[in-house]
Image (spheres, helix red, strand yellow):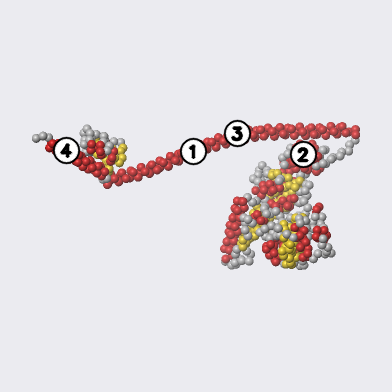
């Protein structure tokens, strides 16, 4: 793997060294633009620096450029060791390479930084958010004026919309999660922004940058943003009102409002980063019964429970709730989000209060907060308390209680009573859940049986449809064939080729004789029996209901053949008789 060591060298200058397998491939000092050419040329897997804060302060242009590359580059701060403790670069070089320097110059720093990173030293730095931005925007430098401007803006609007639709379809096909925002100016769409929740190198497999005469597509990662330290120990109920302007309201599990805000085109990742600085979201709430997709995905990303009201809250209800809380909000979006959060808190308040009454004497404030979070996520009160106590025991926590000796038995009895009540409550809940599960299993079994029956019935009907389709096809073919034959017969009758005979015109020729014979089947048979009639079977084109349709030309041909055969037969018989007479005596 190639590693790029980097250090700041004066104003807008960077000392760099490209290292592979312990050897320097290239070294020098370059501007940001030239450095980017070096990075594209060698495609390093790691960027090694001695100070990330120095890079962020003086090399912001490089950080931004790295976020637009078609490949990912990991950033390693080589001076950061275990427990987040930083060591001087000179001390690390002396320790690992036995090189003593009072102070390293920028080129030496870049070289040794690359070597240290190659040895696996230092700490990886999260330089970019775990998101990729796909930005479609018009080219600002080409904007016709006068009469052509409106037509130009319409073309750009449709072009941006078309490209956004194509990218949406592609991301949906490959299953990548994203948010999409459109920016408008004076009613015209000027840009579309996708925030895709995937690495940049993965996104670029499906979405390629583009630069044309009217629009550009840029694919890049944004540097991490800092909003202050995260409050990991606090659990939150968060109300969200999504839209072009997204409102957020944050409450703790005591019902205290901590913060509200409203921002335009706010991606889910950005929302979560703003929420996490206040604590961990346990419940994500909305003020409408048909939950917006934005809120569903936000709850899924944070692992929080999704709360929705039974019906949409009216404007009057939301205003009344906010007035009751007494927290000042600046926009209607904050008002709607705060009303949603409060409705969710009101839903859980009774359980929270019961938890405090039943277990407030046993659980610490921290444990109560954790138990409330578990209750919000669907645990029973007893289960939540038991899991919190069990977790602390497994983690090695010991709770020391100082009590007077004469009251020890009384306290133990009270504790045991509380635990017995908790276990009985949990038992009742489990029995109820068991009954519900049994009912559910029974219902699913019936549904499965119905489904199997429907599948069998469907297959039977499918076979019947196939059989009927095959029969219909055969009937249609027979119908077409019959129609062709009928047309031929009609034309034959009209042209004189065919002639219609009644059934009584066909005779038994061996007895009575006739033109058409029903008791003779071949010409030879007719000749041998001395019958001059034509076998009707040889010339019948069609027979139906007492009538024959006879091929008249064929009948005449066969009749002529029979006549000749009979004539020849009579001639041979006469010749034979004359010969016999000649041989008789005098």
Q: Quadrant of the C terminus?
A: top left
Residue, disc 3 = 446
The answer to whether marks 1 and 2 mark residues whose Cβ atoms lie closer than 8 Å is no
Residue, disc 1 = 463
Q: Is residue 428 above or below residue 493?
A: above
CA distance for labels 1 and 4: 73 Å
Of badges 1 and 2, the one in the foreground is: 1
Q: Residue 423: where, in percent of width, then height?
A: 77, 33
Q: Secondary structure under badge 1?
A: helix
Question: Residue at coordinates 25% horizontally, 44% vertically from top-left?
Answer: 553
Question: Residue at coordinates 90% horizontally, 35% vertically from top-left?
Answer: 404
Residue, disc 4 = 576
CA distance for labels 1 and 2: 57 Å
Q: Residue 101: where, in percent of width, then height?
A: 83, 64
Q: Earlier in the sequence, mark 1 or mark 2?
A: 2
Viewer-nearest residue: 514 or 486 = 514
Q: Earlier in the sequence, mark 4 or mark 2?
A: 2
């Amino acid at each position: 793997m190639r590693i790029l060591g980097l250090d700041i060298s004066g104003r807008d200058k960077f000392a760099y060294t490209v290292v592979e397998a312990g050897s320097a491939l290239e070294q020098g000092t370059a501007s940001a633009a030239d450095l980017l050419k070096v990075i594209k040329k060698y495609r390093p897997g790691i960027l090694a620096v001695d100070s990330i804060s120095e890079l962020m302060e003086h090399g912001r242009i490089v950080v931004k450029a790295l976020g637009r590359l078609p490949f990912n580059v990991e950033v390693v701060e080589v001076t950061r060791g275990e427990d987040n403790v930083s060591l001087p670069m000179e001390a690390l070089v002396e320790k690992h390479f036995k090189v003593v320097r009072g102070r390293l110059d920028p080129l030496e720093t870049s070289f040794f930084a690359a070597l240290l990173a190659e040895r696996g030293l230092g700490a990886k730095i999260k330089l970019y958010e775990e998101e990729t931005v796909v930005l479609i925007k018009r080219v600002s430098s080409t904007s016709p004026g006068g009469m052509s401007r409106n037509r130009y803006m319409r073309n750009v609007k449709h072009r941006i919309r078309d490209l956004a639709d194509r990218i949406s379809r592609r991301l949906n096909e490959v299953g990548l999660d994203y948010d999409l925002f459109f920016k408008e100016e004076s009613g015209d769409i000027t840009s579309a922004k996708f925030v895709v929740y995937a690495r940049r190198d993965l996104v670029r497999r499906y979405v390629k940058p583009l630069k044309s005469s009217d629009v550009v597509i840029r694919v890049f990662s944004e540097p991490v943003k800092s909003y202050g330290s995260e409050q990991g120990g606090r659990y939150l109920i968060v109300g969200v009102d999504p839209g072009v302007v997204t409102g957020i309201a944050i409450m703790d599990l005591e019902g205290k409002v901590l913060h509200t805000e409203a921002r335009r085109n706010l991606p889910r990742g950005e929302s979560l980063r703003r929420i996490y600085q206040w604590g961990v979201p346990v419940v994500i709430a909305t003020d409408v019964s048909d939950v917006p997709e934005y809120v569903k995905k936000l709850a899924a990303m944070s692992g929080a429970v999704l709360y929705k009201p039974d019906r949409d809250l009216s404007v009057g209800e939301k205003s009344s709730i906010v007035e009751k809380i007494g927290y000042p909000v600046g926009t209607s979006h904050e008002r709607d989000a705060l009303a949603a959060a409060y409705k969710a808190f009101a839903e859980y308040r009774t359980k929270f209060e019961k938890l405090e009454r039943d277990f407030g004497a046993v659980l610490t404030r921290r444990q109560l907060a954790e138990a409330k979070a578990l209750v919000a996520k669907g645990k029973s009160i007893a289960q939540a308390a038991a899991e919190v106590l069990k977790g602390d025991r497994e983690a090695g926590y010991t709770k020391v209680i100082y009590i007077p000796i004469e009251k020890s038995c009384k306290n133990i009895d009270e504790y045991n009573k509380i635990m017995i009540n908790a276990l009985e409550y949990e038992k009742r809940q489990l029995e109820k859940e068991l009954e519900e599960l049994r009912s559910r299993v029974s219902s699913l079994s019936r549904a499965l049986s119905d489904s199997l029956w429907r599948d069998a019935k469907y297959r039977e009907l499918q076979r019947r449809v196939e059989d009927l389709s095959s029969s219909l096809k055969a009937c249609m073919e027979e119908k077409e064939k019959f129609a062709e034959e009928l047309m031929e017969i009609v034309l034959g009758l009209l042209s004189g080729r065919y002639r219609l005979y009644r059934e009584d015109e066909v005779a038994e020729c061996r007895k009575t004789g006739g033109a058409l014979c029903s008791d003779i089947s071949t010409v030879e048979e007719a000749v041998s029996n001395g019958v001059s009639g034509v076998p009707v079977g040889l010339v019948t084109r069609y027979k139906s209901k007492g009538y024959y349709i006879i091929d008249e030309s064929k009948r005449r041909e066969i009749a002529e053949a029979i006549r000749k055969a009979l004539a020849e037969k009579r001639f041979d018989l006469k010749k034979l008789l004359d010969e016999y007479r000649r041989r008789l005596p005098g």
